[in-house]
Every structure is written in C-alpha cells, then in structure tokens.
Amino acid sequence: MLVTGGLGFVGSHVCVALAEAGYDIVALDNLANARLSVLARLREIAGRRISFVRADVRDGRALAQVFRRRPVAAVLHFAGLKAVHESVAQPLEYYDTNVGGTLTLLRAMRQHDVRRLVFSSSCTVYGAPESLPLTETHPLRPANPYGRTKMIAEGLIADCAAAWPELKYALLRYFNPVGAHPSGRIGEDPLGVPNNLFPYIAQVAVGRRAKLNVWGGDYDTQDGTGVRDYIHVMDLAAGHVAALARLESQPESFTVNLGTGRGYSVLEVVKTFERVCGRPIPYEIRERRAGDLAQSWADATLAERLLGWRARYGLEDMCRDAWRWQSLNPDGYPERPVSAAETRRRRSRRRS
Ligand code: WQD
C-alpha cells in the first residue's frame, strides 16, 4: 500500500490499522505538516517495518520511482492541506497541493497501472446543510476553498475512472476526526496555534494555552455553541481498512460519509474533557468565527450497509485518548534527533 501523507494525523493512524490488517506499507510525506519522529513511533506500534519516502505528492518523478520499485496494490491519499480558515487566506497553495497533488497522483497511477484508490475527502464538500443528518446525496456546495479543492479532487478521480474503467475508488467524507491511538504514542500535533477544537482544548488542559475561545454562543443549538460530528481517529482508520477490503472484494467505486451520526456541542466537549482529564478548561464565549456552520452531523448508514462498519467510540473515549496523547506528549512530537552524520554535515556546511 502507498499511503500519501502517511506521517500526518489521520494518515499515521491509518498506517497502524493497515499494518495490523497485515498490509505492507510505504508512507510518503513531505513533512510540511508532520514530523519525522512519527515514523519511529509508527514502527513501534505497528510491530512491522513501514517504509518511508520523503517526497511531495506533486512530484511525479518520486511517485513513479515508488511505483517502479515495488508492486503497489492500492493508494490511500491523505497528503493535502486541511485548515478551512487557512484555505481562505492561501487558496492557490490549497489548489496546488490538494488538486494538483491528486492530479499528479492519478497520472502516475495510470502510467503504472495502479488500479485502487482510497481518497481522504471531507464533509466540507456539502457546505451549509439544507437538512440534517447529511447524506451522501446532499448537494455539494462547499463554502470555502478547502471544501472546493476536495470536491474538485473527487471529480478528478471520478472522471479518471470513467476514462480508465479499471480504476476503482472509495471517496471517504470525514466529519471531525479527533482523539488518538490508545497507546498515547501517536496523536494530533498541529504546528503552531491549533485551528481545531480538540487539540486546542488538549493544549489548555496540559497548560500550553491559558483558555479556550468558544467561537459563538448564539447559534440555534441546545446551548448556543456549534455542533459537530466528532469521530474517533481509530474508528476512521477502521473505516479505511473496511473500504479497502470492499474494493478488493467487490470492485466497484463508492462514496460514503465517515461519521458517528451524532453531534456534540462545543460546551458538551468541554465538559466531557474536564471530566476525563480532571482539570478545569477555562473558556470565554467570543464572537462567531467567519465561515463556521451552526450544526453538522452525518447520516452514517450507507457506510454501515456497504462496509459493515460503524463508529464504536463515544465522546468520552475521544476525550480520554486525546488527553492521554497530550499528557504523555505535552509539547507534541519531538523534533527528529539529529544523527551524528547529519551533525557532521551541518558543521562542515557552517565552516564552508
Ligand atoms: C469545531 C467547533 C468551532 C476551535 C473541521 C476541520 C476540517 C474538516 C471539517 C475534515 C466549531 C468550535 C473551534 C476553537 C471553538 N474535517 N471551536 N474554539 O470547523 O468543523 O472543521 O471539520 O476534513 O478539516 O477543520 O472543526 O474543530 O475547527 O471547530 O469554539 O478554538 O468548535 O466554532 O463550532 P470544523 P473545528
């Protein structure tokens, strides 16, 4: 299996699940939003060798080299940028990486006859819900560049498969991935100030942030704060293994939501996290964040019917595993220890 973005938050957890399912893995990552120190932890947890290629998914030559070096049965494509608010400020970077990367990958897959693809898509393709829960047939009206890049990438994949019928694919539309592997050895470690709720709360709990800003307390929800379908990253990883198994057994393409079918408000998450970590999470209700939806949660019945998969973990499990990861790694992943050879090379460069 080739896992692009394999050292990222979701990609790394899927690598563990794939290894446990007995697959051999090549993780490809450009380390723009991941640290190399994840690799050693992956190998520790997975208990088997995971090959690593440091490359950008937009580098066609690097992809061709991977496909030439060994037979690749399928690609799981996570490599991409995923911060909704950042996409508004940097649309070209998002289109280049998320759309350009998918285009380059499809071209390389076609050239090397790699016929199975699992794509990391997103519920943001739906935009503001016309009705809830969100089903896969809901109109696609993404409201930001991030969501539009995911919708366009889905279209690229579908059009490529129409022209090359041997290509079979799974489009997995994630809701809000949170939590961490129960070992606490891998988890969510955003660079800089976290955009997302869970890592921000975890950093408040561990003392790295003073308080949580709750963006909006006047939504039309039970407590006025935003409601989302949080899904444990281990449930998400199991969904990928199930999707791959279906592509192997019944070669037809499909699109499914990966969510729990249940929404939780910001304040419900705060209260649950406090109970789990045994510490107060100070917060302040602030103005709404531009682009935020009031409510979003999945109709997850199609994934259950097609994949025999459903989310098993609840909010308490998500908070418990997110807290274990954060409390064991207060500053996130360490920078990769610099090898002696690298140290010598850096010294000689400084002298020259
Ligand atoms: C959740 C709720 C905020 C931070 C995410 C990912 C995106 C996509 C969809 C997969 C909202 C509130 C947040 C904070 C807060 N997933 N919040 N204070 O916006 O639903 O988007 O899911 O593709 O990648 O970004 O998630 O965690 O940012 O926000 O009050 O400091 O928490 O207003 O109601 P969102 P989020």
Image (tube, rainbow, N blue to C red):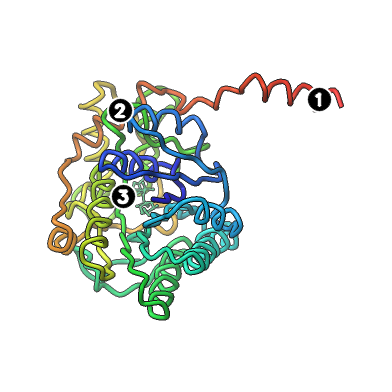
* Rendered residue at 51%/35% (across/down): 35
Q: Count the marks: how many?
A: 3
- Label 3 Cα neighbours within 10 Å, binned few <14 / some 14-19 / many ≥20: many
Residue 176's tag is 3
Q: Residues within 10 Å of mark 1 (few under 14, many from 20)?
A: few
Label 3 lies in ligand 1 vicinity (Cβ under 8 Å)? yes
Q: Which residue is mark 2?
A: 323
Single out the mark in the foreground, 2 or 1: 1
Q: Give x and y (percent) for residue 206.
A: 38, 23
**Mark nearer the N terminus (3 vs 2):** 3
Task: Label 2, secondary structure: give it.
Answer: helix
Instruction: Identify the amino acid type marked 2.
Output: Trp
Element carrying mark 3: strand
Q: Are marks 2 and 1 in contact (CB under 8 Å)?
A: no
Q: Position of residue 347 (x, y in %)?
A: 77, 21
Residue wearing tag 1: 350
Which residue shows up at 74% across the image and 25% down it?
A: 346
Residue 34 against residue 74 in the figure, above or below: above
State yes or no: Cβ of the residue under disc 1 lies below 8 Å from any atom of ligand 1: no
Residue 121 visible within the image: no
- Give, as a three-letter code, the residue at label 3: Asn
Secondary structure found at label 1: helix
The residue depicted at 80 percent of the width and 23 percent of the height is: 348
Q: Earlier in the sequence, mark 2 or mark 1?
A: 2
- Expressed as whole percent of the image width and height from the top left, the position of residue 254 reads 26, 68
Q: Quadrant of residue 174?
A: bottom left
